[in-house]
Amino acid sequence: MTGQNVGYIRVSSLDQNTERQLDGTTLDVRFEEYCSGKDTKRPQLQACLNHLRSGDTLHVHSIDRLARNLKDLQSLVEDLTERGVTIQFHKESLTFTGSDNPMQRLMLQMMGAFAEFERSMIRERQREGIAAARKRGKKIGANPKLSKQQIAAVKKRIKAGESKKALAIEYGVSRQTIYNVIS
């Protein structure tokens, strides 16, 4: 009996399109998510890993779609191949079965290192962009939920014994916002 063809598709944000990944590949099951590949704590990745059985083939568009961290990539590939799962990376034309030759391992490590390097560069550019925006006087982050006058009123009312929950409802904010105001 042959296993299932399982697809794992990941993009980093909702405005990105998943259509090009694994286009034309016949899949029995497809796991798709919109989140960063910075670690393996991704709901659909975990669901995919739990679904896979010996004899299955995991299809992934490219190495960086599975992991952006060399350690995570190697761990995922080793764990899956030890379980009898074949992993096929379409863009790189690499397939891992557990009986991989040294050249395939080298290619996996090199491509994984490039994916990790690319993630580091993205983060560095983000930090540089934020620093440049702050230098130009731009405010980074969300706008305050409450004005200075509202904060003063909330603090006064809490001191008078009013419920934090009631104040959060009245001002249309979360209780955490109220706790942040008083801390």
Image (cartoon, helix red, strand yellow):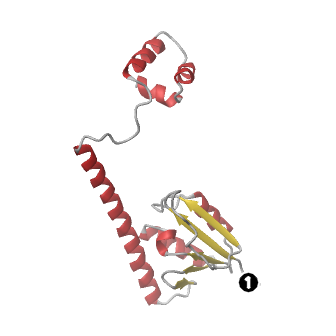
Residue at mark 1: 2
- Snapshot quadrant of residue 115: bottom left
The image quarter in which residue 169 lies: top right
Label 1 crowding class (10 Å Cα cut-off): few <14, some 14-19, many 20+?
Answer: few
Q: Is residue 153 above or below residue 5?
A: above
Q: Is residue 158 above or below residue 95?
A: above
Q: Position of residue 128 (x, y in %)?
A: 27, 54
Q: Residue 55 placed where, x, y %? A: 68, 81
Residue extending farthest to the right is 1
32, above or below 28, in the image: above
In the drawing, does residue 137 fall left or right of residue 36? left
In the rendered structure, the answer to whether residue 17 lies left or right of residue 153 reads: right
In the visual, does 7 lie left or right of 164? right
For residue 115, above or below residue 149: below
Observer-nearest of 5 and 16: 16
Q: Image quadrant for the N terminus?
A: bottom right
Q: Nearer the viewer, residue 163 or 142?
A: 142
Identify the residue shown where x is 55% and y is 84%: 95
At x 53% / y 58%, what residue is drawn? 41
Q: Quadrant of residue 180?
A: top left
Instruction: Count up the numbered dots.
Output: 1
98 or 4, nearer to the observer? 4
Q: Secondary structure at mark 1?
A: loop
Indicate the amino acid at tag 1.
Answer: Thr
Quadrant including the C terminus = top left
Q: Give x and y (percent) for residue 176.
A: 50, 31
Query: Please, which residue is most extreme toward the top here?
Result: 160
